[in-house]
Amino acid sequence: MASGKLKRYGQLIGLKPEAYEKYVEDHAKVWPGVLKTIYDCNIRNYTIFFKDNMLFAYFEYIGNDFDADMKKMAADPVTQDWWAIMEPMQQPIPTRKKGEWWANMQEVFHTD
């Protein structure tokens, strides 16, 4: 297990209405290589929710260098192939920051 302090992330992106069924079907059988890369990049409890053509992702990061782990994930060929299938179904929100695909959200409350 990585020794970093746990940090929670929330992200938001649109989903094209015509893509809903395929997106859900594909996520019912995520490729093992994609899941391994997510784990190897220190992400835990990764969950995606859907409402009103929006996807909300939640995950916990346990590593020490988020940017380096995200570069590692982006460099993985299996993950690149997965993203090539997922990205055309997604619709980034207009208010995302430059360089974001999924828009990062600000945590304003948490309790255990």
Image (cartoon, rainbow, N blue to C red):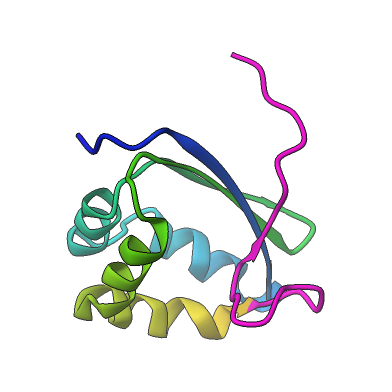
Dominant secondary structure of the magenta stretch?
loop
Residue pictured at 23% horizontal, 38% vertical: 2
Decide whether residue 8 is among the magenta residues.
Answer: no
Q: Which residues are magenta?
A: 91-112
Q: Residue furthest top?
A: 112
The percent position of residue 54, horizontal first and vertical second, equals: 72, 61
**How many numbered marks does the figure carry?**
0
Q: Quadrant of residue 62?
A: top left
Q: What residue lies at 40% left-to-right and 85% top-to-bottom?
A: 84
Residue at 59 percent of width and 76 percent of height: 101
**Foreground residue among 7 and 53:** 7
Q: Is residue 53 above or below residue 8?
A: below
Q: Is residue 112 left or right of residue 66?
A: right
Whether residue 102 sits left or right of residue 24 in the image: it is right
The residue at 30%/55% (across/down) is 38
Q: Position of residue 87 (x, y in %)?
A: 51, 81
Q: Is residue 34 left or right of residue 89?
A: left
Judged left or right of residue 73, residue 15 is right
- x%, y% of residue 95? 81, 73
Q: Quadrant of the N terminus?
A: top left
The C terminus: image quadrant: top right
Above or below residue 28? Residue 95 is below
Can residue 110 be found in the magenta stretch? yes
